[in-house]
């Protein structure tokens, strides 16, 4: 279990580094209890509430409907975009939690 947590946390840090590379200020959530794993704010002023999903093999799972709902509601309250970041073999893809459209940071 802790291994799984550590693996996920490493992937959250990877996504944070990638977003910082795109100029965003990124805050990682403490533990994994919040709706968003990280919050990114871009120089343009746009904000992302990001839920990171990672897998060791195959395709990362999607968040459960409950988690997706919490993410969307926390993003709305903060005038942010709810984003799912899927990590597979250190490749990261971003999509909107609302309309499933691919996003580019």
Image (cartoon, rainbow, N blue to C red):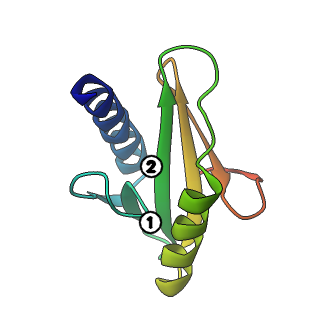
Residue 42 badge: 1
**Relative to 33, does residue 52 appear above or below in the rendering?**
above
Helix, strand or loop at mark 1: loop
Say which of 91 and 23 sits in front: 91
Say which of 16 and 69 sits in front: 69
Q: Residue at x 48, y 52 (%)?
A: 51
Q: Position of residue 61 (x, y in %)?
A: 61, 34
Asked whether, in this view, residue 67 is left or right of residue 23, the answer is right
Asked whether, in this view, residue 29 is left or right of residue 80, the answer is left
Q: Position of residue 77 (x, y in %)?
A: 50, 86
Of the 4 image quadrants, the one containing the N terminus is: top left
Q: Residue at x 58, y 61 (%)?
A: 66
* Badge 2: residue crowd in 10 Å (few <14, some 14–19, many ≥20): few
Helix, strand or loop at mark 2: loop
Q: Position of residue 45 (x, y in %)?
A: 47, 76
**Relative to 105, does residue 90 appear above or below in the rendering?**
above
Whether label 2 touches label 1, CB < 8 Å:
yes
Residue 22 badge: 2
Asked whether, in this view, residue 25 is left or right of residue 96, the answer is left
Q: In the rendered image, which quarter is residue 24 located in? A: bottom left
Among the two numbered marks 2 and 1 on one chain, the one whose residue lies closer to the N terminus: 2
Say which of 72 and 22 sits in front: 72
Residue 14 badge: none
Q: Is residue 83 visible?
A: yes
* Badge 1: residue crowd in 10 Å (few <14, some 14–19, many ≥20): some
**Relative to 77, does residue 90 appear above or below in the rendering?**
above
Q: Residue at x 62, y 16 (%)?
A: 58
Q: In the rendered image, which quarter is residue 7 located in? A: top left
The span from disc 2 to disc 1 (Cα, nearest Å) is: 8 Å
Q: Residue at x 55, y 13 (%)?
A: 57
């Amino acid at each position: 279990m802790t291994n799984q947590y550590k693996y996920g946390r490493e992937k959250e840090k990877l996504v944070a580094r990638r977003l910082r590379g795109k100029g965003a200020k990124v805050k990682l959530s403490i533990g994994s209890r919040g709706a968003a794993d990280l919050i990114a704010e871009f120089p343009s002023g746009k904000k992302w509430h990001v839920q990171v999903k990672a897998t060791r093999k195959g395709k990362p799972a999607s968040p459960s409907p409950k988690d997706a709902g919490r993410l969307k509601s926390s993003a709305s309250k903060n005038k942010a975009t709810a984003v799912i970041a899927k990590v597979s073999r250190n490749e990261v893809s971003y999509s909107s939690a609302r309309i499933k459209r691919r996003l580019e940071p």
